Image: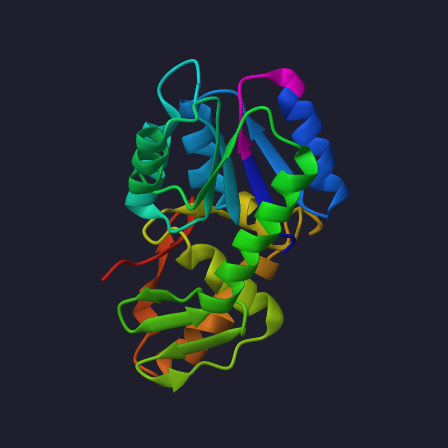
Amino acid sequence: MDQRILLIEDNPDITRVVQYELEQAGYRVLTAADGITGLTSAREHAPDLVVLDLGLPDFDGAEVARRLRKTSSVPIIILTAMDAVDRKVNLLEAGADDYMTKPFHPEELVARVKVQLRHQQHGEVISIGALEIHPQKRLCHYNGHEVRLSPKEFDLLTFLARQPGRVYSRQEIEREVWNGELPSNSNVVDVHMANMRAKLRDLDGYGIIRTVRGIGYALKTP
């Protein structure tokens, strides 16, 4: 899966420039013009990094960062027109990993995005009960034992693990893990789920993947 950047910014001119620069750098960019839409997009798409404007039309960007931090460790870079030291401290305490003061150069923002993603790649571990996933090393352990997954099985389990408890439809899974390239009425998602369950069952982890009849799948929380 390509790395996804969520840009939450209400100024269309800034959005257009930043989106262009990030896409030129090879990232997939999702955009939102207000906090509510941004939080919804973060929940549905599990971005690898969030670029967040402080002055949003519905509520303060710092509040968006606090809400994101309740369920995610995604890196957050805040864009702000305020240069006061105490305000910057408050942003970091709200959960921001970095900030840039407007006006800024888009190329510098791209450089900071790369730094944050590099830090994330070196240290990210997803732990849910006995399940431990190292996305960048592409290693998965359950109860201390390695789970030998195929590349797509690993992508699929990691996708579910980034939002444990959330139910994903088969269509959402196909779009995010297979980039929407599966034919209609395909059972590929179900086959991969069955294969993962069989591998986890050998380690007493069969039940961690939950089937919601008529909807899709979720990873159980401890």
- 70 vs 167, left or right, is left
- Residue extending furthest toward the right: 24
> According to the image, what is the colour scheme of the structure?
rainbow
Identify the residue at image location x=34%, y=83%: 203
Q: Position of residue 57 (x, y in %)?
A: 43, 13
Quadrant of the rendering where the C terminus is positioned: bottom left
In this view, 23 is above or below 196: above
Q: Please tell me whether residue 10 belongs to the stretch shown in magenta.
A: yes
Identify the residue at image location x=73%, y=46%: 25
- Camera sees residue 170: yes
In this view, 221 is above or below 199: above
The image quarter in which residue 219 lies: bottom left
- Residue extending furthest toward the top: 57
Q: Which residues are magenta?
A: 7-13
Identify the residue at image location x=33%, y=66%: 127
Q: Position of residue 220 (x, y in %)?
A: 30, 59
Q: Please tell me whether residue 77 belongs to the stretch shown in magenta.
A: no
